[in-house]
Every structure is written in structure tokens, then in C-alpha cells.
Amino acid sequence: MSERIRVLIADDHKIVVEGLRGLLEPEYDLVGTAENGRELLKLAKKLTPDVIVVDISMPLLNGIDAVAQLQETGCSAKVIFLTMHNDPAYAARAFDAGASGCVLKQSAPSELVNAIEKALEGGTFISPMIADGLMEHYKTGGHGQKDPLAKLSARQREVLQLLAEGKSAKEIAKILSISARTAEFHKYHIMDVLGLSTSAEIIHFAFKHGVISI
């Protein structure tokens, strides 16, 4: 008997996780669940799953940046993103990070199963509701050039998310293992680059661009 495919789920909503568990357990070996992007990094390294099903919007580190970091470590797991956002810009960022699939949460459950199967075969899957928009996004040059997040480094995006979640410079320093002074430097550089002047504007920007969900 061949070994079952190992799946790791990353989503901060317990109801969603339980729904995914019920959908996937009959066919796959669910090796773990992560509630935020930083926990995902640790569990992916520890559990070496074949497939990761990950929400785009998660606390501490969003799914896109978490997966980008996993790719840099040589993680070979196939990644399927789940998202509530039908904006093609999110899908474009997801595939840039190394996704094999992007599935809308409001889609039929069969779409996620199809996405996993396609990924394991070496292909890709995009929910039909966003596929046309994604193609148009690339054709019209919307990719990269109009994404203000592209102006920030990976570390700056991490700091941006934590600021938007209400973390202080001291708390950010502890989470990222940097000094509070460095955290403050990143904060003011981010605000300067993005043209933001208040904490409220940081939160609004992060929500608008899918870095956080409220």
C-alpha cells in the first residue's frame, strides 16, 4: 500500500480548519495545522508535508510572505492558497511566491481537491472566478508595477504587517529578533516609501492590500 499524501493546513479560523479536515482526511494524511504564518514556517520544516494548504491572510506573517520564505529554504511542498479575495493582484502575488494553486474560499469544495491533484501532477489550478481577471492583470501590465508592496523588502513587509496588527517597536523587535531601534528604522522607512503618516493609514493600507484581515 502506497503512503498517503501528507498535508499541512495553515489558517487562523478554526471553523475553516475543521471544514478542511472533514474534506481532506478521507484522502490525505493531515499532519498538522498552523494558526499563523510563523507557526507555518516551523511546522513545515518539522513535518515536511507534500502539500501545504494556506490562507493568504494570517496573523504575524501572511501566507504569501510565509510561503516565499519557505521557498528560500528549499521547501519542496506544493502550495495551494485559499483566499476570500477575488482581486487578481492577490493571485499574482501568490503565484510569484511559489503557489501551485489559488482557490477562493467561497468556491465549491471540489475545487480544492482538484487543485491538490493538479499540483501533485506538476500542474497549476486557479479558481475560474479569478482566472480571467488574473490573465487580464498580466496582459495589461498590472503585475508588479502597480503593487506598492513591491517597493518593500521582505523584512519591511514583515514589519508592516506587525505594525498594522498593533505591535509596538519593542514587540516587533522580539518577534523578528532585531533591536527596537532597527524596528523603528524600518517603520519610518516604510511610512516614507508608502507615503503614510499615521498608524491608522498603516492599518488601512495593510488591509487594502491583503497584508492583514479585519
Image (cartoon, grey):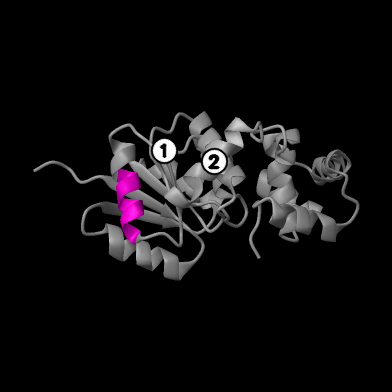
Q: Which stretch did the figure color magenta?
A: 109-116
Q: Residue at x 89, y 41 (%)?
A: 192
Write the residue at 75% across / 61% down.
Answer: 166
Looking at the rendered structure, the secondary structure element under dot 1 is loop
Compared with residue 70, is residue 12 higher up or lower down, i.e. above or below? below
In this image, 59 relative to 114: left or right? Answer: right
- Give coordinates of residue 204: x percent, y percent: 77, 58
Q: Nearer the viewer, residue 41 or 149?
A: 149
Instruction: First in sequence, mark 1 or 2: give its number.
Output: 1
Q: Amino acid at mark 2?
A: Leu
Q: Label 2: which residue? A: 134
Q: Which residue is drawn at the image coordinates 8% and 43% (left, top)?
A: 1
**Horizontal and vertical percent position of residue 103:** 44, 51
Residue that badge 1 annotates: 100
Q: Nearer the viewer, residue 206 or 140?
A: 140
- Tell me the distance, in whole angstroms, between the alpha carbons under discs 1 and 2: 14 Å
Q: Quadrant of the C terminus?
A: bottom right
